[in-house]
């Protein structure tokens, strides 16, 4: 039995046609220790309470620095990672209610494009075999002639020559391989594509071609995208709306240009202040916000606002004690679609609160809580500690 859930308000406007509705999503990875008895000594809070709605046909860009949980969120949406808590409702169906064959069938509608096409394509399979594999799994190859036509259409849609079918992944350039990866995702006629860093492994000259291809395909096939990137420029170009992630949570969400015109969260301000401006005069006078310290370990996230250990606007004691919710702010000219997780967003926007120096003093080291965890592992290395 599938559970049909009423589509909720969200995605900026109450009447929005929401395809994907994520509520309170958490993915916590256990950190295990011990040779004989696996003892759980802590958790990596990779995704820690995310609400996110994506409208049918839109492109939602997700940005944040390495290790903040972007890929884990993408994988949890596709149920490739079992959520610890929360729900993912896709086109009115709560995915947690699907098991086995039902979930497998549902997967046809939600596909992933990966950062590293070479790593994600089986090197022993030709493009034809790669494309047919997914189609076969979803019963789309029963009529050989129809399947053949579909393969030709797919190649033409992603701009690859017909003779590509008999080639192996290593015979292509990086950009062409990503086209194969996109064709494979398209082969089962999905509604949603989660593209995880789709161009970051490509040369800059090829990146724009692949981004343009994704845009053309969206128009042609009515696709909905979740595009994950650490590069703000990539996301700006392609996204209708953008979400900024920090340590497992969304800290800001807005329509594309609104975010760049008026970033309201201190973390987004810092991220955008680091993006070079082509005009040399503006570039020289531009104020850069340098954040102290590194991203704290998601195995030991700071209390209260996760950003308080690095935030130049932090205030005692609320920032350390209370985790801010993603909320609509009361700032002139800022629409309700622009939401921010900061207690002091209004005061920061008005200039009532100014920046101050932040000492990296109150970051509790992971080994103070879990002495067993090798403190040198950092945010990304905790995975290895669980081995
Ligand atoms: N299977 C796993 N087991 C344990 N920890 C994991 C696992 N997968 C990811 N993590 C940890 O969860 C955190 C978030 O990882 P994730 O890959 O989602 O980040 P990301 O934002 O995609 O980073 P990047 O930009 O480098 O791809 C990291 O600290 C990572 O080490
Ligand atoms: S809630 Fe406090 S610490 Fe967090 S971003 Fe806002 S001012 Fe900074
Ligand atoms: Mg990632």
Image: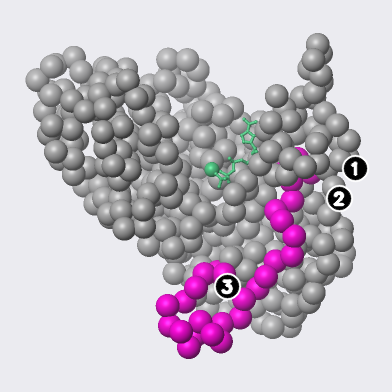
Q: Are marks 3 and 1 in contact (CB under 8 Å)?
A: no
Q: Which residue corresponds to mark 3?
A: 273
Is residue 308 depicted above or below 16 in this figure?
below
Q: Is residue 282 magenta?
A: yes
Task: Choose the circle earlier in sequence order: 2 or 3.
Answer: 3
- Where 382 falls versus 231 (above or below)? above
SS at mark 2 in the image: loop
Q: Tell me where the magenta segment starts and ends, as one range.
A: 272-300
Q: Along the line of sight, which residue is nearer the eye, 131 or 48?
A: 131
Which residue in the structure is indicated by mark 1? 368
Q: Is residue 334 visible?
A: no
Residue at which label 2 appears: 364
Helix, strand or loop: magenta stretch: loop
In which image quadrant can residue 184 be found? top left
- Horizontal and vertical percent position of residue 354: 74, 80
Q: Residues within 10 Å of mark 3 (few under 14, many from 20)?
A: some
The C terminus appears in which quarter of the rendering? top right
Q: 233 or 108: which is nearer to us?
A: 233
Instruction: Residue at 59% x, 60% y: name it.
Output: 252
**In the image: residue 247, left or right of residue 138:** right
Q: Residue at x 61, y 70 (%)?
A: 269
The CA span between labels 3 and 1 is: 33 Å
Q: Is residue 72 left or right of residue 44?
A: left
Q: Neighbour class for label 1 at 10 Å: few (<14), some, many (≥20)?
A: few
Counting every numbered tag in the picture gives 3
């Amino acid at each position: 039995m599938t559970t049909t859930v009423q589509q909720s308000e969200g995605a900026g406007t109450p009447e929005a046609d929401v395809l994907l509705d994520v509520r309170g999503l958490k993915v916590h990875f256990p950190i295990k220790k011990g040779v004989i008895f696996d003892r759980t000594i802590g958790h990596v809070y990779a995704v820690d309470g995310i609400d996110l709605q994506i409208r049918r046909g839109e492109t939602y860009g997700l940005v944040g620095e390495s290790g903040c949980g972007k890929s884990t969120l993408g994988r949890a949406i596709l149920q490739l990672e079992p959520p610890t808590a929360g729900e993912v409702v896709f086109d009115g169906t709560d995915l947690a209610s699907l098991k086995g064959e039902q979930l497998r069938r549902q997967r046809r509608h939600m596909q992933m494009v990966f950062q590293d096409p070479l790593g994600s394509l089986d090197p022993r399979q030709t493009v034809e075999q790669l494309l047919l594999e997914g189609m076969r799994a979803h019963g789309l190859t029963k009529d050989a002639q129809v399947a053949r036509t579909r393969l030709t259409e797919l190649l033409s849609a992603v701009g690859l020559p017909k003779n590509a079918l008999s080639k192996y992944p290593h015979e292509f350039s990086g950009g062409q391989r990503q086209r194969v990866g996109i064709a494979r995702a398209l082969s089962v006629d999905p509604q949603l594509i989660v593209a995880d860093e789709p161009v970051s492994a490509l040369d800059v000259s090829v990146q724009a071609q692949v981004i343009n291809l994704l845009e053309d395909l969206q128009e042609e096939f009515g696709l909905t995208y979740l595009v994950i990137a650490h590069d703000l420029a990539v996301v700006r170009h392609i996204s209708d709306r953008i979400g900024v992630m920090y340590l497992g949570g969304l800290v800001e969400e807005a329509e594309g240009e609104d975010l760049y015109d008026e970033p309201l969260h201190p973390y987004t301000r810092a991220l955008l202040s680091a993006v070079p401006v082509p005009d040399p005069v503006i570039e020289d006078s531009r104020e850069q916000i340098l954040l102290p310290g590194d991203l704290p370990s998601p195995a030991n996230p700071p209390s209260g606002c996760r950003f308080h250990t690095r935030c130049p606007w932090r205030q005692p004691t609320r920032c350390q004690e209370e985790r801010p919710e993603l909320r609509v702010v009361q700032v002139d000219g800022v629409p309700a679609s622009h939401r921010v997780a900061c207690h002091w967003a209004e005061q920061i926007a008005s200039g009532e609160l100014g920046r101050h120096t932040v000492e990296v003093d109150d970051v509790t080291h992971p080994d103070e809580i879990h002495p067993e965890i090798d403190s040198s592992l950092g945010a990304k290395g905790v995975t290895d500690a669980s081995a």
